[in-house]
Image: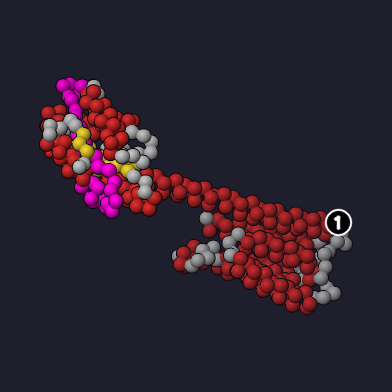
Amino acid sequence: MRLRMQSLVAISYGVDATLLLLFHFAGTLPLWVPAAYLAVAVVACALFFLLLASSWPERRNDQNLTGIQMPVAAAVQLTFLLLAPQLGFFFLTILFIVFAFGALRLDPKEASFAWAALAAGLGAVLWQVRGELALPNRTEFEIVLVWASFTLVFGRCVFLGVYGSKLRVSLRKQADELAASIRRIEELASRDELTKALNRRSMLAILEQHLSAAQNHGQSFCVALFDLDNFKQINDRHGHLTGDQVLQTFSQLTQATMRSSDSFGRYGGEEFLAVLVGTTPELALNLIERVRLRVAEYNWTTISPGLSVRVSAGLAGYRQHDSITSVTGRADRALYEAKKTGRDRVAVAA
Ligand code: GH3
Ligand code: MG
Ligand code: MG
């Protein structure tokens, strides 16, 4: 990319040298002016090609060496303005290309500095060549060359502007793609791989938020801990793959039953956690019962012949001064009660 841009710079110098040679044939300049210009251009381009191809630019902030190329190019034009003022307009207009090139990469501070340096240099040179500065237009050939010079300078300025806007568009696209990747990574990191439900880390973060909302704004919430009944047996009798499918289906059934404001995730193994907002344990019990019934009534034999699945749950409501551990601890003890008193049931924490 850097070397391609440098090739364009070299071509640009070539265009200038050719125009200068034609001005020599038009009688405007002695031959040494295009010869010297070409020599300087070849040396400068060769040096920058070597520098850009080396690893040196990678260690710099300014990887395209714009901060060096631009002053060099501006100095070349000012020198030739001094040496051949009879073609003054030519070197003055090339400065537009030099600055359009610089504007692609310089930051506002550097650009201001470059502009001030040019103002000083240009002022000194113009002072030196006073009375000699010219735009040759004596012959038709000179007129054609002046026209060609202006046109080619404008063309290169426009090209640099278009190139700059293309660069901005592609940077914008890259930034958008990066943002989309980050969103995707965050999404992946927040979900359980098997069931696609929220994972334990996300559920704990959500619980933390609800806890602080409850403490600060008095908004109550409930926690329900689900544990599939005799899941080890399901694995043993129907295989681990069926077990996985049961976990997936249970997760889907539960999420379809719950309200969109509620959160549901896999807490670990065959245990799931739900956080229900703005509700009391008495009201939440209805919803959790509906989940339990839906699981019990689901036609599990479509997954494996003879398969039946039951779930138990423990429910606890937020209490003042609760922590994550205390509220989930009560839900866990309620779950233990549900298991102890026969499974396939919901128990509310005392
Ligand atoms: P209980 O009714 O008392 O809860 O009995 P249980 O068999 O469900 O309890 P236990 O905790 O002993 O067994 C849980 C089983 O869940 C053991 C483990 O192999 C299984 N399990 C945990 N994670 C997965 C998983 O991702 N896939 C499958 N297929 N099984 C899992
Ligand atoms: Mg368990
Ligand atoms: Mg279990």
Placement of 219 over or under 247, stated as above or below:
below
Q: Position of residue 56 (x, y in %)?
A: 47, 67
- Identify the residue at horizontal 17%, vertical 21% (top origin): 305
Numbered range of the magenta stretch: 301-329
Number of on-image labels: 1
Question: In this orientation, which residue lies closer to the viewer: 56 or 176?
Answer: 176
Placement of 21 over or under 269, stated as above or below:
below
- Identify the residue at horizontal 36%, vertical 41% (top origin): 278
- Identify the residue at horizontal 75%, vertical 58% (top origin): 149
Residue hosting label 1: 140
Quarter of the figure with residue 228 = top left
Q: Residues within 10 Å of mark 1 (few under 14, many from 20)?
A: few
Q: Position of residue 164 (x, y in %)?
A: 61, 54
Q: Position of residue 315 (x, y in %)?
A: 24, 39
Q: Position of residue 110 (x, y in %)?
A: 60, 69
Q: Amino acid at mark 1?
A: Glu
Q: Is residue 343 left or right of residue 124?
A: left
Q: Is residue 280 magenta?
A: no
- Identify the residue at horizontal 39%, vertical 50% (top origin): 217
Say what secondary structure mark 1 lies in. helix
- The answer to whether residue 45 of the structure is visible from this angle is no
Question: In this orientation, which residue lies closer to the viewer: 40 or 160?
Answer: 160
In the rendered image, the residue lying farthest to the right is 138
Quarter of the figure with residue 13 = bottom right
